[in-house]
Amino acid sequence: MTKRLIDITVAAVSLLLLGPLLFVLALAVAGALGRPVFFVQVRPGLHGVPFRMFKFRTMLDAYDDDGRPLEDAQRMTRFGRFLRATSLDELPELWNVLVGDMSLVGPRPLLMEYLPLYSPEQRRRHDVRPGITGWAQINGRNTLDWDERFRLDVWYVDHQSFWLDLRILLLTVRKVLAREGINEAGKATMSKFTGSQGS
């Protein structure tokens, strides 16, 4: 079976089996955080082509007295932290896998604004479809610095195989259950990428 066929099969079966859970989570998000239920953001896909990525919302809409959004850590609720810690917020990305925007395994899709900041080597992470999980996610996730994360992403591009993908998926389950590497200490998200940290 090809990687794409495996992606389609697993995503379709997962969406069918997880349908009731997705419905309950959608209701819970709407009740705890309000609407919209989904966080939708444009991210770079294969060869950097933009696509709309879907996740369950994990933060409140909250603003300071001047109308500016509060810091992520201030907008994050206990329920939002639970969704992130268990990676349940990532489940809607199965739709992105089904329609071909993403793969089950590949470098995580980052922000569009980062594209001009990549070195030629770092840009190679876009030679494959982005994934729900990846080699960097099982080797440190958000605790990695940016240079190490990109190095692991490019390593995956050069070594991808069915058996490596299977290993990554199995280790991802273990990491999620252990709640390892979710965030940097004291932060709701990973620090912003401002360019290569190497010389």
Image: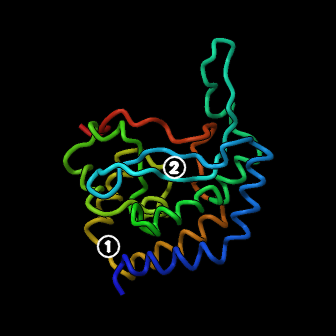
Residue pictured at 63% horizontal, 16% vertical: 67
Any mark on residue 188, and which?
none
List the residue tagged with mark 1: 160
11 versus 110 height, above or below: below
Asked whether, in this view, residue 112 is left or right of residue 28, the answer is left
Q: Amino acid at mark 1?
A: Gln
Asked whether, in this view, residue 126 is left or right of residue 100, the answer is left
Instruction: Look at the image and tell me in which quarter the C terminus lies.
Output: top left
198 versus 175 height, above or below: above
Residue pictured at 52% horizontal, 64% vertical: 95
Instruction: Look at the image and tell me in which quarter the N terminus lies.
Output: bottom left
Q: Amino acid at mark 2?
A: Asn
Asked whether, in this view, residue 59 is left or right of residue 144, the answer is right
**Circle 1 crowding by C-alpha within 10 Å: few under 14, some 14–19, many from 20:** some
**Separation of marks 2 and 1 at Cα, in angstroms:** 21 Å
List the residue tagged with mark 2: 142
Residue pictured at 79% horizontal, 44% vertical: 32
Secondary structure at badge 2 equals helix
Residue pictured at 68% horizontal, 70% vertical: 19
Q: In front of the other: label 2 or label 1?
A: 1
**Circle 2 crowding by C-alpha within 10 Å: few under 14, some 14–19, many from 20:** some
In the orientation shown, which residue stands out farthest toward the top? Answer: 66
- Residue 185 appears at what percent x and percent y? 61, 41
- Residue 21 appears at what percent x and percent y? 72, 67
Secondary structure at badge 1 equals loop
Q: Earlier in the sequence, mark 2 or mark 1?
A: 2
